[in-house]
Image (cartoon, helix red, strand yellow):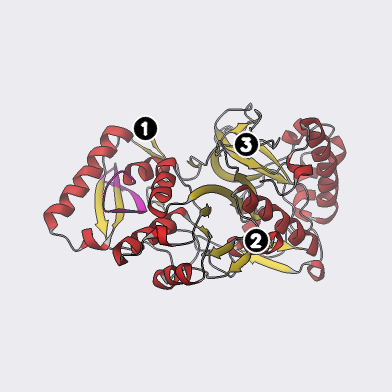
Amino acid sequence: MIWDHRNECMPREEIGQLQLERLQSTLNRLHRNVAFYKKRFDRLKITPDEIQTIQDLAQFPLTAKEDLRESYPYGMFALPLREVVRIHSSSGVTGKPTVTGYTRNDLHHWSQLTARVLTAGGVSKDDVVQITFKYGLFTGAFGLHYGAELIGASVIPMSTGNTRKQALIMQDYKTTALVSTPSYALLLARYMEKEGINPQSLSLKRGLFGAEPCPESMRREIEERLFINATDNYGVSEVMGPGVSAECEHKNGLHLYEDHFIPEIIDPQTLKVLSPGAEGELVLTTLTKEAFPLVRYRTRDITSLDYSPCPCGRTLVRMKKVLGRSDDIIVIKGVKVFPSQVESILLEVEGVEPRYQILVEQVEGADSLELKVEVNERVFSDEIKNLQNISAQIERKLREIVGVSAKVKLVAPESLQPVGGKPVKVIDRRKK
């Protein structure tokens, strides 16, 4: 199913022309209204008028999360606060939060984009959608909520936590579509198994997952345990929230909505733009955001872009599932370690939950790696010998597959669950 045929199936040459027109308008507005961008453009002696092709965008400087924090709270807004009708922000767990604003038009576009996401995942007006993202300053729940309502689906704004009640509502309210993180979907599946609830007795048909990576092995496990069709979607809180890209039924990459965003892939070290198909860091430029437009924003997510045709009929470029983050790459004794590699290993170990934390320190001048991993309740209450065997199994796989040695520490279920915001997966305490 396709929500917006006109824009999702637009000929490639028309996409390019639309992007250029919207980009020129955005850059002029930023140069005129946002001191941060005006100062940068003037310092580099470049003007919005110099943009003649999309490729010219590479002349402009990159924008990083640190820039947004330094402009806290409203320094990056392109309009007066009286025209901003919604404010969201990050948790601020690792520093000042990043604050984003939305005009009425921004909210309209956001709803349209998340309607595309949900429709691509199979949701229609006949569905009952249970949203388990946290409602509040986090963008995820509200973005998908209004998209589902726009489609005409019935929405259950359940929010996070209370797994027992989540399962009860899923049974009694006849939920057909689950919106959550993939790890929470697995937690729900394991809870149902423990409580003797047969997923096949539910009305659940599909799951739409975001906010964290979902490797293929995790997707397969979710689909097999909950008997659903699972699709992945991607968003960036600073850029929009959910609604940047989403999988269609063919699951061969996430269609990125190029009528609203220009994607680039850069080398995270050299910051040079890479050619199509190359793997690197995703950079996004907004084309329709009024309150909080961004130019060449570094998402820090590692992916690649595929411009080949998709059987679904959408002409939009597809981004590969996020492989990891450029700021989460850990180099241990010359070996690059992606958290996604660790996740893939943990998904193959029975009794282990998909939540973990990597701690890197220097001990007597040498790098030391510790991996904290949650186990389920049955394993955690098991005898020490069994716990030691699981730790040894994970340590062996890390040596054989990734090429690093680590001390594995098994911890209680949900003990690594964050109080607010996204979980911190990597803590590097080495002296830089």
Residue type beneath disc 1: Gly
Q: Can residue 243 be found in the magenta stretch? A: no
Q: Can residue 363 be found in the magenta stretch? A: yes
Tell which tag, 1 or 2, sits nearer the viewer: 2
Residue designated by label 2? 148
Residue 69 point in image, percent of width and height: 62, 58
Is residue 256 positioned above or below 375 on the image? above
Is residue 66 positioned above or below 53 on the image? below
Under tag 2, what secondary structure?
Answer: helix
Under tag 1, what secondary structure?
Answer: loop
For marks 1 and 2 on the same chain, the one whose residue lies earlier in the sequence: 2
Observer able to see residue 157: yes
Residue type beneath disc 2: Ala
Residue sitting nearer the eye, 144 or 345 = 144
Which residues are drawn in magenta?
347-369
Observer able to see residue 259: no
Contact (Cβ within 8 Å) of mark 1 with mark 2: no
Residue designated by label 1? 334
For marks 2 and 3 on the same chain, the one whose residue lies earlier in the sequence: 2
For marks 3 and 1 on the same chain, the one whose residue lies earlier in the sequence: 3
Residue at image point 82% right, 39% down? 18
